[in-house]
Image (tube, rainbow, N blue to C red):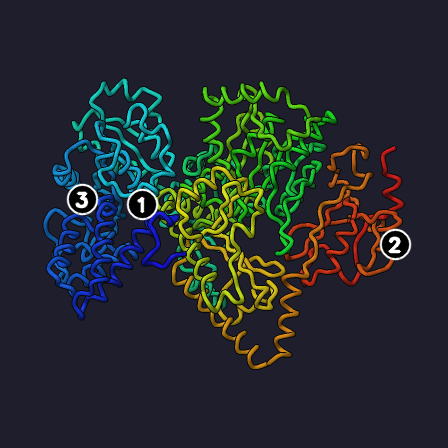
Amino acid sequence: MASDTTKSLSQYYAASEARVDEWRVLSRLAKSLDGRGPDAGALSEIQHRMRLLQPIEDLHAYPGAALLEQVVDRLKRGEWAAFHRMVTRISSALLTNAYREDLAAWALDDETETVVGDVLPPAQSHAQTRRPYFEVLVVSPMAPKQWSSLREMFRRLRRTEDEFIYEVVVVGSFEDAVLAANFNYNLQAVLISEGFTFDSEHDIPVLREMLAPFLPGDARDGDLGTSLAGVLNDLRPELDVYLTTDRDPATVAGSDAVARVRRVFYGPEEPTEMHLSIQGGIKDRYRTPYFDNLKKYAARPIGTFHALPVARGKSIFKSNWIRDMGEFYGTNLFLAESSATTGGLDSLLDPTGNIKEAQDMAARALGSDRAFFVTNGTSTSNKIVHQAILTPGDIVLIDRDCHKSHHYGAVMCGAQPLYIDAFPLKQYSMYGSLGIRPIKEALLTLKAEGRLDKAKMLVLTNCTFDGHVANVQRTMLEVLAIKPDMVFLWDEAWFGFARFSPYLRRRTAMGAVAALRKLLPSAAYKEQYAKFKAEVGEIDPGNKALLDTRLWPDPEAVSLRVYETDSVHKSMSALRQGSIVLVSDQKWRQVEGPFKEAFYAHTSTSPNLQIIASLDLARRQVELEGFELVGKATQLSIEIRSQVNNHPLISKYFRCATPAEMIPAQYRASGLADFNAPDQTAIDIARALNDDEFFLDPSRITLLCGNAGYDGTQFKALLASEHDIQINKTSRNSVLVQININNTRSDMAHLIKALADISRDIDHRLAEGGESARKTFDARVRDLVEDVPDLPNFSSFHDAFRDDPASKSCEGHMRDAYYMAFDEDNCEYLPLNDKRVDERLANGPALVSAKFVIPYPPGFPIMVPGQVISEEIITFMRKLDVKEIHGFNAARGLQLLRADILEKKRPA
């Protein structure tokens, strides 16, 4: 990646971070002038950056025109010290967002806190109760010289009883409005006045590059006001959009074109109503029905006569022995506890009040038709969906290296898993993700055998633990072309944040649903399908060319049935185990009953109230600042990758795996190889997201440690014990560094410092140990990086657990095998290295697993109940050097189902 002083704005993934970095660089350059007078090179660079920043600052309320004029004036006058102070103050305020609350940040005089002119800051002082700050974008046809009076009009509308404070940003063109929405994360509302132009007055190539990914080709067509509303809704769906028109307001308001507009006004006749509407729109998102009520409940003098001694905290605060519990957690936690569902607390099992309202608001924020809170993790969310959709004997197509909850879900509902292998990443001892081609192959095989009707659901992980993001829209289209009523369960446990990234949203389940709901009924798609039908005809399972042909479903036959499960606690600010099920199912009325039964079966009658409240609050946060926080986290992950891979010392031993190293070339049609490739821009990223079968989530960094002589488990322990850094997932030669909205640049510095210290230590040990130490080190690196075992594919279920052993499809009744193993008389044990294992592999009878066997790493089941154990599986297990293998007792050996009993169960 280019240095801070040379990196182009269009190379940033978060435009807001590009702006902040520009000010940071400007501050450093200004410091070089302060005290030593003008330097021709630095002065020229400063002038260039000021010219570039001017149109960007027009898209923000802070620092504002008057303060910027002061900065430019100091520069022109050669007042270097004053220029440096003002630039540094603005840079610091932008970096910390201090201008939202600190009056001094808005001061025109660089040595005082005097605030004058028309740049009134947020109308609050340090003595007032805090009122959240935001900005409103007004898209106006008025001449720029009139914009200051427009801003002043809205300032005069402020009231002391307003819950929020806002400043107004005015632009005069379609392009500038889209740029503002991309750059300015403070924007929460947009007021569109008809009559503005399309083209920006700023003809700056780098800004057009940043604009390109978000402007559809037909943006100029038709009415610009409603077109802009649509583009802004696609870019940032959380924004409240208002429209003022001088046409017949009733006609405009009743048209489909303004369906996503919050309110239509007739010209500028009701500025007070505009102000109140803007405040009301923010209040609607800020409101947290369950949390708000829980606070009120905690403040009431409640007498508790139910089974929860910790409620109100008296058993703790009056205790002689556990009073420190209350001192640590505080009073409110216990005041807000109850096992009752009355008094306005509502019931999670059958919500009709504020939980129901909070769930509806979460559905709105996350783009689904319905949302259901789950307080015991996405493991439970997944099982709920399995049990709601699947019945005994149904076939569920499933990614073999998915989370264990899906395997157990199949056991519980009695469905037959049809395991499909993801592409392997042997060099890291991990799997990637499940390609479209093998899914189509499995479906076409079922169709050829007349059993496609039994395939009820496809389960896919998106993104995977290691960051592989599917092309969700294309996957669903091609599957629906073969089975138009397929139910999709997208396990997005790690990916809930992506809804609030304008880049990644299209790759989420609900983002794809929104796109398909627009695409499938369109005339353009119907024409596309007619062309496809004429060329391909009916879907013939015997036509192998279909595996490599882009398939398109019949729009009249398709039923969109999509479920998404999110671990809210993994990527948003919710307490641990806070999860959510999102539903956009065209046939919901058919499944509503079974879904509720499954929800009852898996939901505690004593859910944690604080987890429910945190889900409510997490929704509020992402709906109001998700765009900001996700953008910052994404940009931070890109910077970490660059810092590690370009550091002269660290890169000798450590490396952040690139998209090219994590995704085979056949899945990257765009050719995207490295997030930090020179001259790569946002246009390239958008192209990859649109075209590639898989994309790598930048925030999931596979940090390769094999070249440092550490396996993943060792390195994880070293980081924790010596450097106070916590890591979750490991592989044979890597650890996973996860970046989320909680991480900061200080965290980045902490990690880089640790890696540098470890690298220096390795250098020192090798230099001190001489040739012997080097040979030992090189051998260890070879073992970790080169001598890696092949990853075993799923073999098959034993014939005893298959309806038709002659079938080319490989599904099986795993539930029967699972419960068969509960009876020890049905089982036998063989030590892993026993020669009888090899004899039976060669001559039979087959070795059949009695249970799930899951080594960590890699963390997926290499055996499931009823599976025939292959030679590849045994070889892999014998080469494993990990300590944690769930389902395997090294002292007893492999737990197998007895061959003689299986033979009796084999179908005739």
- Residue 260 relative to residue 389: left or right: left
Rendered image quadrant of residue 275: top left
Identity of the residue drawn at 64% across and 57% down: 857
Mark 2 or mark 3: which comes first in sequence? 3
Image mark for residue 597: none
* Residue 868 position in % (x across, y down): 79, 46
What is the C-alpha distance between the residues marked 2 and 3? 84 Å
State the residue position of label 1: 206
Nearest the camera: 341 or 711? 711
The answer to whether residue 419 is left or right of residue 675 is right
Q: What residue sits 50% from the left and 53% below the top?
A: 700
Coordinates of residue 488 in the picture (x, y in percent): 58, 34
1 and 2 marks in contact (CB < 8 Å): no
In this view, the residue farthest toward the front is 40
Q: Quadrant of the C terminus?
A: top right
Can residue 868 be seen here? The reply is yes
Label placed on residue 160? 3
Foreground: 854 or 3? 3
What is the CA distance from the residue labelled 1 to the residue labelled 2?
67 Å
Residue 839 disc label: 2
Residue ID at (79%, 55%): 894
Identify the residue at horizontal 58%, vertical 65% (top origin): 707
